């Protein structure tokens, strides 16, 4: 991986999550967000500039618009809008006390407003999937937006929360998943009185199914996660992983998902029972954290891996086939994604490592050979390493698989790096 461009130091530039590409279809323009600060959480009136670089010819940031709906981890869900990935962009904003989606024409500067903030969009741009950010903000501060406090939704289980489908042409909005539906599937005692929500929606390459996580907070202050797949209309729901341990994932192709998590084992299964969590697991958590390194965002250690069984896992959709991947090579949680041109190539990263001067790794992995093709390390600021303002690399592919973009604090300020593969 060869560094081809880095944003200038005249501001704090970043893009956001790892499932969206900042590069347009011919790799001539690099989308970017620009913030006036980098050292605190985002407040409701903080404005984020949205623009792009003609990065092969200039390092000038060309502002297009701005938003008040953003966070450090996912930005404003900015990306080029399909299906041409060149003339329009899509992002979230807050207008008239509502979180909304904006489709912005970069040539005419016209805005089209959709009635909810989106989470993920189809590759053709004909539909988006959404969660309720008015509720998400109460329980997932680092992955939500401020500015609207609808206290009616600040409840542990809001049964009519869930996932919505919006037709981008007609603006028809339909709920396709509800929390009431989720908690009725294989109910567990640890669900009682827990805070429930859904997140991390990702659509399959052929736009026929999507994956998401149903998560709830357990009495040991941990998170129990289930990974599901489902048809775009909400039918044919399939529980893909019920170990309780599931982190970041990505569709490799239309039938396989690769993600970081654990398989069901006797220890993980104990977390399904509320009383066992309360009287057995919770008292042992301080010892477990001490033995496993204690850094909640540092991925994994040999001890924690032995206890939890966490690793990268290859899941085959609508089956019980689960295969652990490269357990001796890829040993820490990261943000995996695949080249659209060659799904044998996976890019992923690691969190700031306190045992390596808080550096993060960028890893290009060959799925067939089960080996690392290329790896490099980037610096991170220690003061932000375990906080909500940390800067994950969140590696993102170009549409043609020739470039990889990352957000980084490598130079002491927020930057976007563009690497040629």
Image: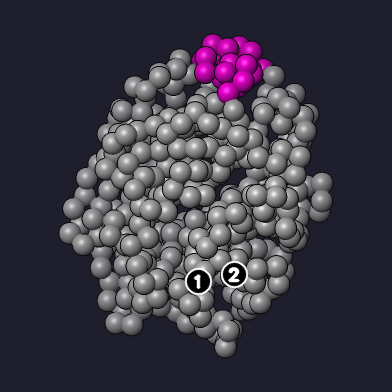
- Which residue occupies 67% across, 57% down? 364
- Whether the residues at callouts 2 and 1 have beta carbons within 8 Å, the answer is yes
- Which residue occupies 39% across, 32% down? 238
Residue toward you, 340 or 187 = 340
Residue 178 falls inside the magenta stretch: no
**Which residues make up the magenta segment?**
264-283
Question: Residue 90: x and y, percent?
Answer: 37, 65
Q: Is mark 1 on a helix, strand or loop?
A: loop
Q: In this view, does 378 lie to the left or right of 183?
A: right
- Which residue occupies 70% across, 67% down? 1
Task: Specify the principal SS of the magenta part.
Answer: helix
Residue at the extreme front = 368
Residue to which mark 2 is pinned: 403
Q: Is residue 112 left or right of residue 154?
A: left
Q: Quadrant of residue 359?
A: bottom right
Split into 4 quadrants, where in the image is the C terminus?
bottom right
Nearest-to-viewer mark from 2 and 1: 2
Question: Residue 5: x and y, percent?
Answer: 64, 77
Residue 23's mark? 1
- Which residue occupies 71% across, 72% down? 2
From mark 2 to mark 1, how far is it between C-alphas?
Answer: 9 Å
Q: Is mark 2 on a helix, strand or loop?
A: strand
Of the two numbered discs 2 and 1 on the same chain, state the one appearing first in sequence.
1
Question: Residue 210: x and y, percent?
Answer: 39, 45
């Amino acid at each position: 991986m060869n560094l081809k461009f880095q944003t200038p130091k005249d501001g704090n530039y970043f893009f956001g999550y790892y499932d969206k590409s900042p590069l347009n279809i011919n790799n001539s323009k690099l989308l970017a967000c620009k913030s006036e600060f980098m050292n605190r959480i985002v407040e409701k009136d903080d404005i984020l500039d949205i623009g792009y670089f003609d990065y092969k010819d200039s390092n000038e940031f060309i502002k297009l618009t701005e938003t008040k709906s953003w966070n450090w981890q996912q930005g404003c869900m900015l990306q080029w809008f399909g299906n041409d990935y060149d003339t329009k962009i899509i992002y979230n904003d807050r207008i008239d006390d509502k979180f909304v989606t904006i489709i912005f024409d970069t040539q005419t500067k016209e805005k089209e407003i959709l009635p909810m903030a989106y989470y993920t969009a189809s590759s053709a741009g004909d539909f988006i999937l959404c969660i309720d950010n008015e509720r998400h903000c109460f329980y997932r501060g680092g992955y939500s937006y401020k500015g609207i406090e609808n206290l009616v939704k600040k409840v542990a289980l809001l049964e009519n929360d869930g996932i919505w489908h919006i037709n981008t042409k007609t603006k028809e909005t339909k709920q396709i998943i509800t929390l009431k539906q989720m908690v009725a599937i294989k109910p567990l005692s640890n669900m009682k009185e827990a805070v429930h929500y859904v997140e991390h929606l990702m659509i399959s390459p052929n736009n026929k199914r999507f994956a998401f996580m149903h998560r709830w907070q357990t009495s040991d202050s941990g998170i129990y996660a289930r990974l599901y797949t489902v048809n775009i209309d909400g039918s044919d729901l399939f529980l893909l992983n019920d170990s309780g341990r599931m982190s970041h994932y990505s569709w490799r192709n239309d039938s396989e998902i690769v993600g970081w998590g654990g398989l069901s084992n006797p220890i993980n299964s104990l977390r399904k029972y509320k009383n066992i969590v309360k009287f057995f697991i919770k008292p042992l958590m301080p010892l477990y954290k001490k033995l496993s390194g204690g850094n909640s965002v540092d991925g994994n250690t040999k001890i924690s891996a032995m206890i939890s069984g966490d690793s990268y896992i290859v899941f085959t959709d609508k089956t019980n086939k689960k295969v652990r991947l490269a357990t001796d090579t890829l040993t820490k949680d990261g943000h995996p994604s695949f080249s659209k041109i060659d799904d044998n190539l996976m890019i992923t990263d690691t969190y700031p490592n306190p045992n390596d001067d808080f550096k993060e790794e960028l890893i290009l992995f060959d799925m067939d050979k089960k080996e690392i093709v290329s790896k490099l390390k980037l610096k991170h600021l220690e003061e932000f390493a375990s906080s909500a303002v940390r800067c994950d690399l969140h590696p993102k592919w170009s549409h043609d698989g020739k470039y990889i973009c990352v957000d980084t604090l490598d130079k002491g300020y927020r930057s976007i790096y563009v690497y040629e593969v």
